[in-house]
Amino acid sequence: MKFVPTTRFAGLAVVLACVGFVASVAGVPETYSFSTVAVVALVVAIWDGLVGTSHSLLTVTRRHPPVVALGAVSKVEWEIRSDAKRPLRVMVADELAPSLRADIRRFAITVPSGSTVEVSTRIEPTRRGRFDISTMTVRIVGRFGLMARQRDVPLTTVLRVHPRFRSKDEAELRIKRARVLEVGTRSATGFGGGTDFEQMKEYLPDDEYRRIDWTATARVGRPVVRTYRAEKNQSVLVLLDNGRVQAGLIEGVPRVEYSMDAAMMLTTVATRLGDHCGLVGFDSQIRTVLAPSRHRDQVSQVAEAMYNLDPELAESDYSGAFSFAAARFRRRMLIVLLTDIVDHSISGALLPALPTLSRKHIVLVAAIRDPQLEQWARPTTLSPPDNEADGDMTPEELISRRISAMNTLRSRELSIAKLRNMGATVIDTSPDRLASELGDAYLMIKGTGRL
């Protein structure tokens, strides 16, 4: 608790000081000198700060949703309740992190006697993670506005900013498409054919000839085919690489953010189609584990497991992560590794560890191809540059950059070929296509009965 002079007090002090100075010059007796006037002003100000400014008369609360998605707009609300016998002039400053992008963090209001006033601000988080919003600083201004009594109010609330689910609409489209195909009249229902027997039906011209059940056909006297549907209760495990290669920016966004979106897309589609989906986040060690489940809020659990992960600027331990997954989850499943395809990481760490999983499971590696790198690899001309940055480069520098980009892309293609030769399915695509192509790959694998 402390007393803080107001701007009104400062103005009054200046005026009184001038009056005291003039009085001294004019030869006014010492009683009316500057020092006497200053003491009187200070006593009045302290009295103003003491009387009717007790914080026991004021109750301040803060409200906000427990979870907000990255980039989504939400609100923080403050409620100020006064039990004083007079209107109170109140000033509040709250500890909202700059990355929450709050419209206001401090405000001044007048609270009528025995009333409650609500104030709110809009927030739009620009960073994931856990935000412990703690101390609120509250000032109650005295009756004459000369002095305020200030107190730091401990009021801790927790705001969790989850990854942004950019591909939510794409996930819904794939779920609808899969369900339409599954209830169709083709003999191989699902997404291209399942292995879970569903029923017998009369043969139609678009049915597969190999699906005809000759025993049933002989019994009823007309062609009958077996229909199948895609199996349910299968398992999918996402291995989210949280290491150095995922810290790089693509179009201003860290790679790991796109990977998290893809993980939520896959979880949504898989669980809604009756499969179990889980997550292991890792870098040089295991950071988070979520067992496969098909619970209706599993995508929220995946977001909760990922939201506080920040890429570690160290090489990821693929061998350790793969061994952990193989030992912890023994049932055959689709294992999706969300990472970046960097030649030294692939050759030195990922490829030697891959057989740990591929002996029993289906492995899919999904990564983002940098559009900027592809642009740099295009043929360079001496025509006016496309942007200001290129305009600062000499033709020799542009050619050198192109050669470097081409070499990087060539190494990437070689790494992809190595992964495919080891039996892995590989997705290497643009940032805006990663989640949707991963969803399509899952549906294809599921529909062809590979699980």
Image (cartoon, helix red, strand yellow):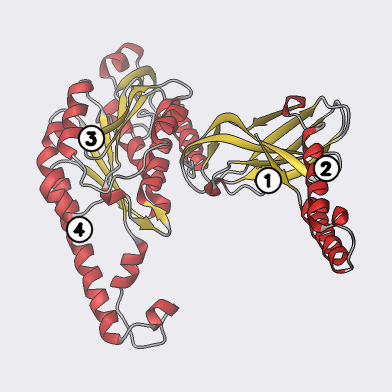
x 33%, y 41%: residue: 441
Q: Gap between marks 4 and 1, in whole Å? A: 54 Å
Indicate the amino acid at tag 1: Arg
Of callouts 2 and 1, which one flags the residue occurring earlier in the amino acid sequence?
Answer: 2
* SS for dot 2: helix
Q: Gap between marks 2 and 3, in whole Å? A: 64 Å
Foreground of the two, 308 or 350: 308
Badge nearest the viewer, 2 or 1? 2
Indicate the amino acid at tag 4: Glu
Foreground of the two, 72 or 420: 72
**Residue 106: assigned label:** 1
Q: Badge 4 is on which residue?
A: 413
Q: Badge 3 is on which residue?
A: 285
**Residue 215: assigned label:** none
Judge left or right: residue 422 versus residue 125. Answer: left
x 65%, y 31%: residue: 63
* SS for dot 3: loop
| Crowd class of label 4 (few under 14; some 14 to 19; many from 20; radius 10 Å) | some
Q: Badge 2 is on which residue?
A: 44
| Crowd class of label 3 (few under 14; some 14 to 19; many from 20; radius 10 Å) | some
Q: Are marks 2 and 3 in contact (CB under 8 Å)?
A: no
Q: Gap between marks 1 and 3, in whole Å? A: 41 Å
